[in-house]
Image: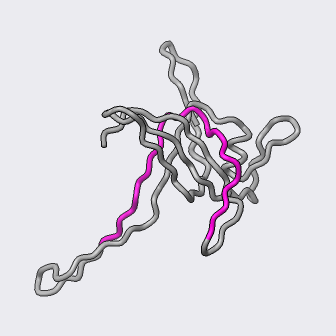
Amino acid sequence: MAIKGLDMLHYAIITEENSTTTTYGTIKPFGPAMALNLQPTINRGNLRADDKVLFSDSSKGPISVSVNTAYLEKTVEADVLGKTVDDNGGITDTASDNAPYIAIGGRAKSARGGYEYFWVYRVKLAPAEENKQTEQDTPSYQTP
């Protein structure tokens, strides 16, 4: 189905999980949504003999998740990346940071009307590349 919008991104930290159940914490707003990309990895293998492919098979590998928001509140960044906000309001960045597994959900506007609601139930995010650039004659925004 054709999608023409994305909004209402939320997240919830996985607080407990075992082989039969997963428990999520409070659902919180992620930030103003710009993009959410899910890119699956497909591993393919071929058995070749007599100068041809006799058998071919594939298996699903990890899915790469990218999230882009207009801005990211410090508390949200700390939550999803396993960091802490210090007494001065700065975010600590240490080698011992350990991002928790989270769920990410939101809604996408359908080209046929209405919305498609979705959740990605288990994701572990990593810090993204961050770029800054001096102001030019034409405004250019950098986002997290």
Judging depth in this view, the residue of 75 and 3 nearest the camera is 3
- Considering every residue shown, the one lying at the far bottom of the view is 50
- Magenta stretch encompasses residue 82: no
* Quadrant housing the N terminus: top left
Tally of marks: 0
Q: Is residue 56 above or below residue 142?
A: below
Whether residue 132 is situated above or below residue 82 in the rendered picture = above
In magenta stretch: residue 34:
yes
- Residue 101 lies, with reference to residue 50, above or below; the image says above
110 relative to 119 in the view: left or right = left
What residue is at 56 percent from the left and 57 percent from the top? 123
Q: Quadrant of residue 59?
A: bottom left
Q: Indicate the position of residue 23 as horizontal and vertical percent values.
A: 67, 61
**Going 46% across and 35% down the picture, which residue do you hit?**
6
Residue plotted at (80% across, 42% down): 85
| Residue 91 as seen in the image, left or right of residue 62 | right
Compared across the picture, whether 130 is left or right of 94 comes to: left
Q: Position of residue 21 (x, y in %)?
A: 62, 68
**What is the quadrant of the C terminus in the image?**
top right
Q: Residue at x 82, y 35 (%)?
A: 89
Question: Which residue reaches farthest top?
Answer: 137
Secondary structure, magenta segment, majority class: strand
Q: Is residue 8 left or right of residue 14?
A: left
Q: Which residues are magenta?
A: 21-44
As drawn, which residue projects farthest toward the right? 87
Residue 26 screen position, x and y as percent? 70, 48
